Amino acid sequence: MRYLDLYHTGELLQRVKVAYGRLRRCDLCPHLCGVDRMAGETGICRAGFKPRIASATLHRGEEPPVSGSRGSGTIFLSGCSLACRFCQNFPISQLDNGEELTPPALAGRMLRLQGQKVHNINFVTPTHYLPQILAALWLAVGKGFNLPIVWNSSGYEEVHALELLDGIVDIYLPDMKYGDDATALAFSSAPGYPEANRAAVGEMLRQVGHLETDDDGVAQKGLIIRHLVLPEGAAGSSEILPWIARNLGVETHVSLMKQYFPAHLASGMPELNRKLTDGEYALAVEALEAAGLENGWVQE
């Protein structure tokens, strides 16, 4: 793993220090709250100084190269920088269910999952705990940790924060949720989502390139983009998918997701208060094919 070299040169520890420094006026995500999390203040994501996790477990339900044959070691972080009205994981992301840990305890969870022979450690909704994750990684490496790192995020990221992960994250698994600002604001309270998201995935591609797998088809490094299709084309699939092809390349792996249903607060929004239809998903598949994006996954 590339981060092993950074550990031995001292660069990983330096990244930890720089990342924690950003918590004094937190600017880890595009909200740029500016709160002093080192002093216990919280911003939009509600995250404090210590990391909070909902679970750390073997998971077989990710994309095939991530789950592989032995599963992905998923660590679900509590809280989120988004407030998606339809979030299917809202008890974790919006209600902050979970357990507060220290970085050494988080490192212990990583090592325990490695002992279960998972293919990777998969941090889910990690952006607001970037410094604490880096600290846990530094501690875990000192005890023999050596698995690929997956950054499984909403895609609402700041490039300057992602730069701290260069050479550390092996596999980026971001969402591309919305094609326009108004929808991002109405559905997820995420001002400027499309611009921030597109800059972020561009940085992710720069760092890790397109997906590379081993002889067994298990991801070793690279980018996989997730796009959840919403009712009435609200996610902007017909815009996002061609953008990926034009700006990231037709070889980009895209996971086109069909599993939308009205969870959390969606019942209060008429445009979101129903399941996705087969016809709506078929239109998104047509947009994927028209863009020439042949790598990835569609759902039956």
Image (cartoon, rainbow, N blue to C red):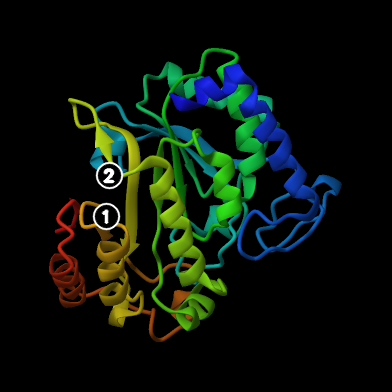
**Residue 62 placement (x, y as % from top left):** 31, 43
Residue corresponding to mark 2: 63
In the image, is 229 to the left or to the right of 105?
Answer: left
**Residue 167 placement (x, y as % from top left):** 49, 34
Observer able to see residue 23: yes
Please name whichever residue, 48 or 139, is drawn nearer the observer in this view of the structure.
139
SS state under label 2: loop
SS state under label 1: strand
Give neighbour class at mark 1: few <14, some 14-19, many 20+ (Cα, 10 Å).
some
**Residue 44 placement (x, y as % from top left):** 68, 63
Residue found 77% across the figure and 43% down from its top: 21
Please name whichever residue, 124 or 171, is drawn nearer the observer in this view of the structure.
171
- Image quadrant occupied by the N terminus: top left
Residue corresponding to mark 1: 255
Q: CA distance from mark 1 to mark 2?
A: 8 Å
- Image quadrant occupied by the C terminus: bottom left
Residue found 34% across the figure and 46% down from its top: 223
Give neighbour class at mark 2: few <14, some 14-19, many 20+ (Cα, 10 Å).
some
- Residue 37 higher or lower than 45, as above or below: above
Quarter of the image where one finds residue 241: bottom left
Dot 2 amino acid type: Glu
Dot 1 amino acid type: Ser
In the image, is 286 to the left or to the right of 157?
Answer: left
Mark 1 vs 2, N-terminal side:
2
- Residue 62 higher or lower than 13, as above or below: below
